[in-house]
Amino acid sequence: MAELQVRVVSSLSEAESFRREANEVHAASARPDVFSTLDFSLHAARNDEYCPGGTGFEPRIYLCYEGNRLLGYLPLRLTRKRRFGRHPNRLEFLAPHFGDRPHLVSRPEDEDRVAEAMLHVILDQGQPWSVFVLHQQDEASAIRRAIARSPRRRFWQQEIPLTPASVIPAADRFSSFQEYLNALQADFRSDVRRGLRKLLKAGRVEYLVAEGATVMPALLPIYLALEGRSWKRDPDTKAAITRDPVRVQLFEGWARGENGACPGAGFVLIDGQAVAGMLYSVGAHDSSALEMVFDDEWSAVSPGTPLVPMTVLRMIEARKRTVGMMHSFGYYKSRWLGEAVPMSTLQLFRLGTPESLRAIAGRLYRLARDRLRPVTTESDELIVHNPTRRAVTAGSLPPMIPLPALEPLLAQAKGDLVRRYDATQLSKLFGLAK
């Protein structure tokens, strides 16, 4: 067996030449999700509103080879942020701000030895970082296992628990939408049907599904306009795609299929006008919801009710295993059968650096504070589904923007999936029709 060699690529343009090899490894990996392709990482890195590039940004894409065969890759970046008059080097994932549980990509049988080889290079004293951050690591993380086996003489580690990610099972558990619907808790299933009945009385209700790189660039403006009619139009929330022109570019590229996944959307229509929408990505085996929104003028009829179940229906039909739902709002997602995936952020500080001293001092302070804090017997705090939305004051919101006409945009689809469900079909799907 040949010795493993780790190559570090420090240019996004140069990394383009490894796409074919990387895609083959990704397809054979244990979790070939839409966020772990090299295509996604490169596209997100070029359209990152938080790190637009320049002298403070350096890609560092680790490629592990056995002879001439690529065994795995780990897309990272080196960033410099001015703190306390210094510029500490921070090594982190290439696309840390958009996605779900970024990880080392390798074939399952190679994961541990690839992780060991990469970590040996990363932790070398000659590597130019003072803080190594691994965001959103779950229990299946190979690089996390490798860190646990590494000697602690050269770095100090801390782990920060995060809100769990949520994954809704689709074709890996259900062969039909009816099976999925029947698996929901009875009281919640009744709530869904009650909400749908109310929605169907609001006018001529339809559900539109669209997927593909010719139709989605045309329909993305519909979704962005819906944001301008929702609570997300409050600029203080920083929740809208339109909060930054670079983020709009990110989604425009996503709509054209530039990040390696098939772009898709579901829209709730009343009298031909979109009142709610969800954007999602479809990969070879799995899918992930990205964004969802509804028009505040229609909030009384709960227009967002069909978005999650109809997306699950689409993925059951397409034989995709799961629908990823990112993190946060776990209680709401669990009602749709979202399964919680515990995760945390790992931080490694090179010993002797000011960053390591501050981190250790902060840890000691928190331990002392917790020891002195009186024990409380208060019950769990009240669950608030979306505190940001509830904090928005309606009177302070900017005016709503008009929606583009939908039908002319749909005419631009060329061979892509466009499917419409009318009220009768929706009633039958959800068991409302007699």
Image (cartoon, rainbow, N blue to C red):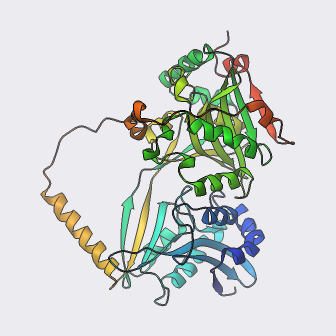
Residue placed most toward the observer, 415 or 160: 415
**Location of residue 416 with respect to 353 vertically, above or below:** above
Q: Position of residue 419 (x, y in %)?
A: 78, 32
Residue 318 in view: no
Q: Is 329 above or below relative to 427? A: below
Q: Quadrant of the C terminus?
A: top right
Task: Say whether residue 348 is visible.
Answer: yes
Looking at the image, residue 279 sits to the left or right of residue 366; the answer is right
In the rendered view, does 127 fall on the left or right side of 179? left
Q: How many marks?
A: 0
Q: Which percent across, then down, holds residue 411?
A: 83, 36
Toward which corner of the image does residue 369 lie, by quadrant? bottom left
> 96 or 300: which is nearer to us?
300
Q: Residue furthest right?
A: 415
Residue at image point 71% right, 50% down: 255
Asked if residue 117 is positioned above or below residue 190 in the image, the reply reads below
Q: Residue 33, image x and y in percent?
A: 64, 56
Which residue shows up at 67% across the image and 17% down it? 427
Q: Quadrant of the N terminus?
A: bottom right
Which residue in the rendered view is the most extreme toward the top? 434
Between 84 and 174, the one lying in front of the other is 84
Q: Position of residue 317 (x, y in %)?
A: 74, 37
Q: Residue at x 62, y 41 (%)?
A: 224
Question: Which picture quadrant has residue 261?
Answer: bottom right
In this rendering, is residue 206 above or below 288?
A: above
**In the image, farthest residue toward the front:** 399
